Image (tube, rainbow, N blue to C red):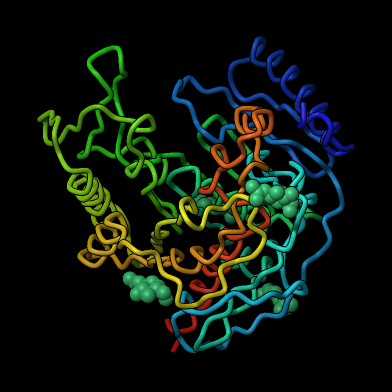
Amino acid sequence: MEATSTINEKWRFCIFACFVGSITLLYCLKHDQDGINLLASGNITITMTSSNDSNQHPSSGMPFLQLSNASEHRKDVNEKEDSCNIFDGKWVYDPTSSPLYHGSQCPFLSEQVSCQRNGRPDSEYEKWSWEAKGCRIPRFNGTNMLERLRGKRVIIVGDSINGNQWESLVCLLYSTISSSRGHIDMNIHDKIFRAKEYNCSVEFYWSPFLVQLEGNEENGGRILRLDKLSDWEKKCRGADIMVFNTGHWWHNGGRLKRWDLFQYKGKVVEEMEVQSAFGMAMRTWARWIDRNVDKTSTKVFFRSFSPVHYGKQRCYNQTQPIKDESYVEKSPNPIVEVVERTIRRMRTPVRYLNITKLSQYRKDGHTTLNTIRQKKLPKAMKQRQPMSHDDCSHWCLPGVPDTWNRLLFASMVMDNSSDNS
Ligand SMILES: *[C@@H]1O[C@H](CO)[C@@H](O)[C@H](O)[C@H]1NC(C)=O
Ligand SMILES: *[C@@H]1O[C@H](CO)[C@@H](O)[C@H](O)[C@H]1NC(C)=O
Ligand SMILES: *[C@@H]1O[C@H](CO)[C@@H](O)[C@H](O)[C@H]1NC(C)=O
Ligand SMILES: *[C@@H]1O[C@H](CO)[C@@H](O)[C@H](O)[C@H]1NC(C)=O
């Protein structure tokens, strides 16, 4: 009831659009199972493809289409940078250079992350800019990035937080090509953005463990195959830029635990420490990369663990980052250690997008209650127990993942300048 009273005009439009969208989708699904052109309007086409996959995707909300003239975001670029640790630095309040795009002008943002549209009252969290200690990080330049991506495929594989990163990257690029054509194909798990005039694509494949989860609870249990990658590996061969992550789903215990048994080399194992199992899965991933990736033409990135803010620094109601630069999480995260060790031992150079620390400062950046999942606002809005239902792991967009992509861009720029010297 409280939620109803705060509904504004935008919101109403959103609900209306989603309703019309759902009806259209249902109608189309009934008539045509493959590739349907759901919405084609102006410069944007969104194609929904039905999928037989029955796994629930936590962020499988249908896109909400809102058309407007995105303004150009032209920013300086400083390409002559010495290499330095761009992940070590501080957040600076800078409303002139952030956000890098406006949420209302990116039609590809999902309801889950559109905090402003969902009624978040403050917007300061959009206006912080990351600065490195030892150097100036190149400014994000979407045109420049698209030129670097001409004729290439970028694949982003991982959990819904990497889905967050994909949405951010698509919006960053889209805001620079709004005068030409942007196009998205999606089904329940895979999302592909194509920038036609650059002949490039930015693709997201949902695989929260990277390895395969099989079976079901009723029938012998859910088995996590530590020696077998999930479907993404077939779809991602030959991609030019790869961005991976995994982590959160390994962490989840109790009610959120998604597996019953592990399987490794034909043996089913009931009792194994999650950390050992995770190490095996990471080695399976590493072997595939070392065998299948041509390191002269492909760049592989691994995005480090995205921090959550529960406990003492809980995200609910937070509007400011943590300013204490000496702030560190108490316990080292075993997931992070396993990832770093695996990457160090690989033959293929893997670029580590080391965003854990910089994101730890941003307790203000999460979607908290300003999120819609499975078409619903959090129960808390009705139950008056906001603290127990806030989402302190996903991020609002525009927001923190834009910085991860800015650093991805910076890594590409800095990589090239060091190749040339
Ligand atoms: C962005 O990159 C493009 C292409 O490299 C370049 O022409 C343009 O000058 C850059 N914009 C700014 C503001 O630096
Ligand atoms: C990641 O960045 C943090 C903060 O700059 C740093 O302390 C840490 O050593 C880095 N980790 C790796 C593996 O580079
Ligand atoms: C577009 O890029 C793909 C690689 O992603 C390449 O195989 C194809 O030839 C390119 N097409 C054109 C028209 O350049
Ligand atoms: C959250 O912030 C609002 C507005 O500042 C305030 O009214 C409310 O009491 C806060 N809630 C909690 C639990 O701190």
Tally of numbered discs: 0
The image quarter containing residue 83 is bottom left
Position above or below: 120 against 52: below
State the image coordinates of residue 362 (x, y, percent, origin top left): 56, 63
- Give the quarter the ligand 2 occupies: bottom left
Q: Residue at x 56, y 88 (%)?
A: 80
Residue 337 visible, this angle: yes
Identify the residue at horizontal 68%, vertical 28% (top origin). 382
In this rendering, is residue 178 above or below 100?
above
Q: Position of residue 372 (x, y in %)?
A: 65, 35
Residue visible at 76% across and 32% down in the picture? 3
* Outermost residue toward the right in this view: 9
The one of 379 and 266 positioned closer to us in this rendering: 379
Q: Quadrant of the C terminus?
A: bottom left
The one nearer the camera, 236 or 367, is 367
Q: Residue at x 50, y 31 (%)?
A: 57
- Tell me the quarter of the image containing the N terminus: top right
- Identify which residue, 61 or 152, lies in the foreground: 61
Q: Is residue 239 left or right of residue 34?
A: left
Give how far across and how far down residue 246 sits, in percent: 37, 48
Is 385 rendered above or below residue 100? above
Q: Position of residue 247 (x, y in %)?
A: 36, 49
Would you say residue 181 is visible in this rendering?
no
- Residue 15: image quadrant is top right
Tell me: 394 left or right of 196. Answer: left
Q: Nearer the viewer, residue 321 or 407?
A: 321
Q: Residue furthest top?
A: 30
